[in-house]
Every structure is written in structure tokens, then in C-alpha cells.
Image (cartoon, helix red, strand yellow):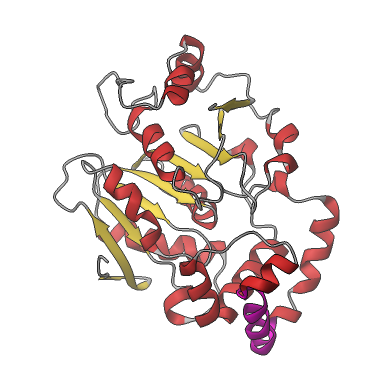
Amino acid sequence: MLKHNILKTKSGPVYYRLFNPQAKGVPLICLHGYADDSQQFTQLAQLLPHHPLYCPDFPMIHDDQPATIDSLTTFITGFIDALDLNHFTLVGFSLGGLVAVHIAQHHPQLINHTYLLNTPSRLLLSPIQKIFIPTLLPILSYKSTCFWLSQLITHPFLRRLIHLPPCSPLTNLHLKHHPYALFKTLALLLAHQELFNPHLLPTRTLMIYTQDDLVLPYYRYQSQIQSLPRQVFILPQGGHAAQSTYWPQIADLLKNHPSGWLVKGQSPGHELFSPAVARILSSPLMRFTTLFGMGRGGTTSLQ
């Protein structure tokens, strides 16, 4: 396992992993999901050997203190400033995607493009949830409550009993070791509705979801997302990055998207595509709507 580097920034020390340090391609800054860490991008780095991947850990899993979108944005902005990169592509998974949206708004001159992977938007909260969730915030202010909640949702039998989706060993580990920081952070995000508005995203942003995601169920936002004035990729499988097919599909898109987001000045070749991806990305209409952001909206299902 690749060891952490530590970078001193204005926001404090940042633990991060640098994959492919000798690579000469466009750098990627990758922001992991809730209760994960920078190890999440190990497979993606192997699939993109020509690009360095800078993958910071969010502070909750090191200092055991809750965070908000604003504090995480400040934290990652300090990391980006300390790296002193001239340009980069930003990849955010789930919670990392929420932070990526804010980073893209603060550093538009440095970011080539932004990819939001399985990232929750305002479309995913029902009116009832918007009212109910804030009531949980006082309860999750107690460390004892967070501890027992972590014991509940990391127990395999109890997860199956209450119909929760499978949890990766890495996520389980962090939930057990940092329950207060993680549960309180989640409560703050949802209570304050700090989810992104897909209608207000920066132009060079691509949203990617999976149909079999059990954490962000596709059926809950399928009809709503079809009305968006931008292209959205819907992968047929991959889960919430839980399946082996997930990162190869993401790597295909990153390497071969028609806009050439990683390979500047080149016409992306389709020989690296899976057949399903190639069929979608080869269409002239897809090239036009993606390059100029003029699509009528809706989803592109890669199947």
C-alpha cells in the first residue's frame, strides 16, 4: 500500500497519496467519498499510468473533528495552493464531488474540467427528508450516540436486517474509528442541505452516476435528472464504486471523452473503449453537445 505524504499548508497539514509521480500527463486531484480515504483511487491510478494523481485525505479521518463543505473547501484549496499546479483536472467522488463543485467555482482558471462521480445533488432529497433530516442534528451532537450508531451500521448482520447496502472494509474501518467526526459531518451536510444545485454547475463539469447504486438509488432521481440542461452519464453497473467494473468505466471516460479533457490537442481514439462506451461517444450529436455544452439535457445510458 502506498504510504502517505504530508504537505504543510495554510490550512494545516494534509495527508495525501501521490500516485504515478513520474507521469507527465495532465495532473488529477482526486477527492474521496464520505468515510473513505485516498486509497479509494488506487485502481484508477493503475488505469491512468500517464497521469499523476494527487489524492488528499479529508481531515475527519485524522483529527476526528466534524467538517462542513466550507471547511473542507478551505482545506482542499490550501492543498491546491501549496501544490502550485498550473492546471489540473478535478475528480470528486460522492462527498468529494460536493467539495469539487466549490473548488471549481473558486479556481476556474486552474481547472481543465471537473468530474462528479456518484455525487448527491438537491434532486435526491424529497420534501419530507428536507424537513426530517435537520431534526437529527442535535441527536448526533453526542459522541456516545455516534459510537453506538457506528456499531450498528458496521455490523454485517444488522446491515442486512435493516436493508442497508454493503459497506467496504475501508469504510467500516473509518466509521468505527472516527464515528463522531463522520456522523456529525454527514448530519451537518444534510441538515444544512449542502448539496450542489445541478442547474448551477460550472460549464466544464460532467456528472456520472450508476444505475445499480444502492447508496444513491437511480430511480429516485431518474425522471428529475432528464430535465437538466447538460449531459449526464449513467453507467449500467458499478454500484457506489463497490464493483470491480466501476473504475475501468470511469478510466475509459477520463481517457477518451470526446472533449479530450485529459489528452489536450488530440482526437481521442476509441480503441481503448469498451463497446458500450464507444457506441455512445462515437455519435456526432454526443460530440457536439459535450464540446459546446449545448445539449438539451437528459441522460446518456452507457449500455
Q: Nearer the viewer, residue 8 or 133?
A: 133
The residue nearer to you, when weighing 121 against 13, is 121
Does 151 sit above or below residue 112? below
Q: Which residues are magenta?
A: 141-155
**Residue most toward the top?**
284
Q: Is residue 263 left or right of residue 187?
A: left
Does the magenta stretch mainly form a helix, a strand or a loop? helix
91 over 277 or under it: above or below? below
Which residue is at 66% across, 72% downward? 157
Where residue 165 appears, as percent x and y from the top left, is: 64, 59
251 and 117: which is toward the camera: 251
Q: Residue at x 62, y 39 (%)?
A: 211
Task: Please identify the quadrant where the N terminus is shown.
Answer: bottom left
Across the whole image, how many numbered discs are drawn on residues?
0
- The quarter of the picture where the C terminus appears is top right
In the displayed structure, 132 sits above or below 205; it is below
Residue 242 vertical placement versus 220 (above, below): below
Residue nearer the viewer, 43 or 284: 43
Left or right relative to 124: residue 131: right
